[in-house]
Image (spheres, rainbow, N blue to C red):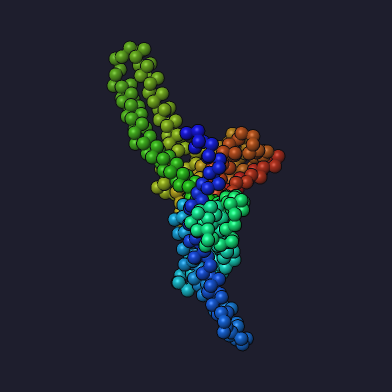
Amino acid sequence: MHITTALRPLLRPFENTGRSVAFLVAGGLVQLAPLLVLALPWLPGGPTEVLSVLLAVFVPLGVLIGATPLLTAVQRARFRGRLGVDIPRPFAVEGASRRERALQWLRSEPAWRQVAYHLVAGPLIALAGVITLLVWAVSIAAFGIYLWMWVVPFPYRPDVLGTATQAAYVTAAGLAGIYGSAWLSNALARLDTRAAMTRLGPSRAEQLARRVEEVTESRAGMVDAADAERRRIERDLHDGAQQRLVSMAVNLGLAKVTLTDLPDDARKVIDEAHREAKEAITELGNLVRGLHPAVLEDRGLDAALSGIAERTPIPVRVRVDLQSRPSAAIEAVAYFVVSEALANVVKHAQASRADVAVERFGGILLVVVSDDGVGGADPSGGTGLAGLAKRVASVDGTFSVSSPVGGPTVVTVELPCAL
């Protein structure tokens, strides 16, 4: 136990060395192939005329460029099989036909990063790997010099084996070479991995772009899920609790009319319960509309915003110009923006009228709420505007407020919607 613990620092340079050596051997077979293809036309008896020289240069180069996807697939398999490293693929190139996809791939940055790896980085690392393997062989042979001296009989022993004293120095040099070869093998494997990740996989900018897309899709899914949950709660309250309250209010009303011989205290209790039930129905109706109004889902923004305008105690002019309905999530955000903005107008603006305009310009849904109030609205002042900004940002929209002191106040929202 103690011996193993003591030897562990001495054996640490050899951790994963076997995998690294196998990785370099496999890499030498794959990474040196491009150099062999480029060198074939220049073997003895190669081109001498200008045209043949140009062909000898550009034909192998074109072959290697065309074979780049295959070479990249082989390299990914080598990294995955030998080191357990999975190199992600760059963004897929899309096109209507195979020829268009090929042309787009040739014009893309990932394609030329892969070509650079197969023509420059890969062969250089492979050459370094070949040298490392030679150092391994020489070091192991030097470390086993005493074995050679014992195997080869003295009369037939070459002078290169030297004496026992010289063999000790050779053994020490061989041991140092083995340690150096182990370190170099692991270092080359790490260097090749970094080069392949940056050249064969997506760049840092592409990874960030992909991550942004994933986060955007995930956030959109969460927004849709939250909107669906609000609609479910609205239906449950409308069809469940609200109907029960209505039934209870009706029964209490009937009791007030039919039970005329009750004591005054009992009639007072029934009257109070009836009034509380009607107030609860009103409050629950407001809560249901705040969650997700049924009219928004059934008839769209125009009808839903008209309903808000009718319930607002000041005159509100509503203008909705939509050729087609946006998605449910965008509709819900637009509805709540108008609802909260008009509530702020009533509470804080001291306005005599307000205007709501909803229009669609291409892929943008523009919502503008304005009033003729005193102005001075501050999104950081706790007036609900900060919450509106967050709600708009949840769907990648933009939110802005113009509210100079003295008015008017204009809330402008731009929401993205598919064409």
In this view, the residue in front, 363 or 271, is 363
Q: Position of residue 346 (x, y in %)?
A: 58, 36
Confirm whether residue 297 shows in the render. yes
Q: How many marks?
A: 0
Which residue is farthest bottom? 49
In this view, the residue in front, 374 or 115, is 115
Confirm whether residue 195 shows in the render. no
Q: Residue at x 35, y 19 (%)?
A: 270
Which residue is farthest front? 155
Q: Position of residue 341 (x, y in %)?
A: 57, 41
Q: Position of residue 106 (x, y in %)?
A: 54, 70
In this view, the residue in front, 7 or 264, is 7
Residue 417 vertical position relative to residue 308 in the rendered view, above or below: below
Q: Residue at x 29, y 21 (%)?
A: 258
Q: Position of residue 78 (x, y in %)?
A: 47, 59
Residue 36 relative to residue 269: left or right = right
In this view, the residue in front, 127 or 153, is 153
Q: Residue at x 52, y 65 (%)?
A: 31
Residue 366 relative to residue 408: left or right = left
Q: Residue at x 50, y 49 (%)?
A: 16
